[in-house]
Amino acid sequence: MNKNSMIATGSPQNDQTFRPIKPHISSKRQGTSGKEKVESIPQIDLRQAVKLPEGEDLNEWLAKNVSDFYRQVSMLYSTITEFCTDEHCPVMSAGPGYRYLWSEDQSGSHPAEVTAPQYIIYLLKWIDSLLENEEIFPSTSNAPFPDDFIVYVKNCMKRLFRFYAHCYYHHLENFQALKMEKLLNTSFKHFIFFSYEFNLISQDQLEPLRDYIELVLNS
């Protein structure tokens, strides 16, 4: 799969793969009443866990965490493949208000509508190709990161967020039935804390889960 380094812009109008259709949807449409807390697996303090460790190189820390989130999303997706099908999810969306298009072009132009499973598979293959590219994600400590490394990181995080948004709008009941809702919530909390810590995703991109993110940040 070709590399795609679409720049995560601050405006949906400049990101042709982002299609807001309706205004913001309340948390009632996101599988939560808006009053409850997000239940997650009590383990470590995720707010502290995402902070850059003393003496750690920032790019190394970003690379490690992008790789971790890639593995988490791969695992989460593998649990719902029987539910997230071309028939049940004919577009990659976050409720009726947002749909996401896929583009292979370097600039993000010529976006195409694909099914949710296709989008997620393309996403995972795309990130895997980046992680395997030594010029972007070097595996040795003495190899330099590219000057535009943060662009790749932001693009990965932006697109990974779309997976979580799709899950909360369309597959939360599936995770609940599989008794994996807490695992999904824990992964998403970790993801959001990390994104906020390093300002990796613009607010307009986070809009589909705005209310839910507020619950996460206050839980």
Image (cartoon, helix red, strand yellow):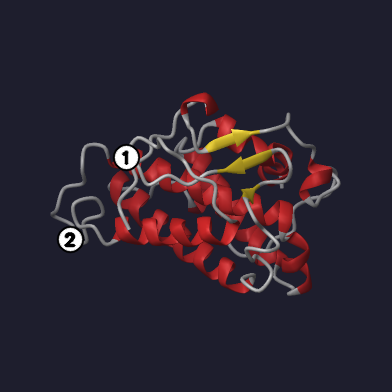
Which residue occupies the foreground of this view, 194 or 134? 134
Which residue occupies the foreground of this view, 27 or 13? 13
Q: What x and y, as percent, mark residue 124?
A: 44, 61
User: Which residue type does callout 1 highlight?
Assistant: Gln
Label for residue 140? 2
| Residue at the spot 71% in from the left edge and 38% down from the top edge | 97
* Lower sequence index among marks 2 and 1: 1
Name the quarter where the N terminus is drawn: bottom left
Which residue occupies the foreground of this view, 25 or 18? 18
Q: What x and y, as percent, mark residue 22?
A: 72, 31
Q: What residue would you read off at disc 1?
A: 106
Q: In this view, does 89 lie to the left or right of 25?
A: left
Q: Is residue 29 above or below residue 70?
A: above
Q: In this view, does 86 lie above or below 31?
A: below
Q: Is mark 1 on a helix, strand or loop?
A: loop
| Residue at the spot 13% in from the left edge and 54% down from the top edge | 142
Q: What x and y, as percent, mark residue 57?
A: 27, 47
Residue density around tag 1, few if under 14, some if 14–19, many if 20 or more, within 10 Å: few
Q: In this view, does 219 lie to the left or right of 77?
A: right
Which residue occupies the foreground of this view, 159 or 117? 117
Residue density around tag 2, few if under 14, some if 14–19, many if 20 or more, within 10 Å: few
